[in-house]
Image: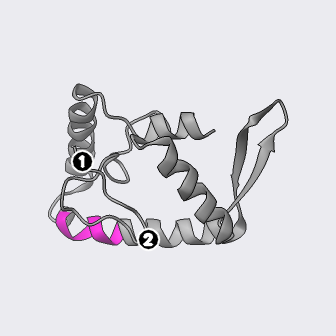
Amino acid sequence: MTTTSAAASFVSIRIVTSTVARLADEGHVDRRPNPTDRRRNVVTLTAAGSRRLAEIQAYADAAQAEPLAGLNAGERSALAALLAKLLDSHGLQGAQGQNSTARGPAVWPAGAPGPPGRRTRHH
């Protein structure tokens, strides 16, 4: 799990491991050994983690609402497509292996505030 998560999120294995450990300690995820490969873990979101994720998503949605307020739905869609193309052209994708520009950038720009508890990554 750690190696795959690290590669997908552009961070080191150490950071993913410590982040998952912190989330598990806080009750946001449940971490168990993979039954077919004990070197890996299976991480699942808990009910508390789902609630926290909803809070973070609401924060992200609110943060995006103001700068996008002048765009209609079609313009927002076009912007998302252009941002996805930009990310693709630089080999950047969202954590699920697909562009995540509909909800926010896969990698936050230097100096841009991320959702609470999220660290920014600079290129």
**Dominant secondary structure of the magenta stretch?**
helix
Image: 49 above or below 18: below
State left or right for residue 50 relative to residue 36.
Answer: left
Outermost residue on the right side: it is 35
Image position, residue 102 (x, y; %): 35, 48
The residue that disc 2 covers is 58
> Foreground: 53 or 26?
26
The reply to whether the magenta stretch includes residue 63 is: yes
From the viewer's perspective, is the residue at label 2 or at label 1 nearer?
2
Residue 95 makes an appearance in the image: no
What residue is drawn where x is 22% and y is 43%?
123
| Stretch of the chain drawn in magenta | 61-67
For label 1, the SS is helix
Which residue type carries mark 2? Ala
Report the coloring of the rendering: one colour
Give 101 or 44, whichever is nearer the viewer.
44
88 up-or-down from 52: above or below: above
The amino acid beneath tag 1 is Gly
How packed is label 2: few (under 14 Cα within 10 Å), some, or many (20 or more)?
few
Q: Quadrant of residue 47?
A: bottom right
Quick check: can you spot residue 1?
Answer: yes
Q: Position of residue 30 (x, y in %)?
A: 73, 58
Which residue is rendered at x = 59% and y = 64% of the image?
Answer: 22
Numbered mark located on residue 74 in the image: 1
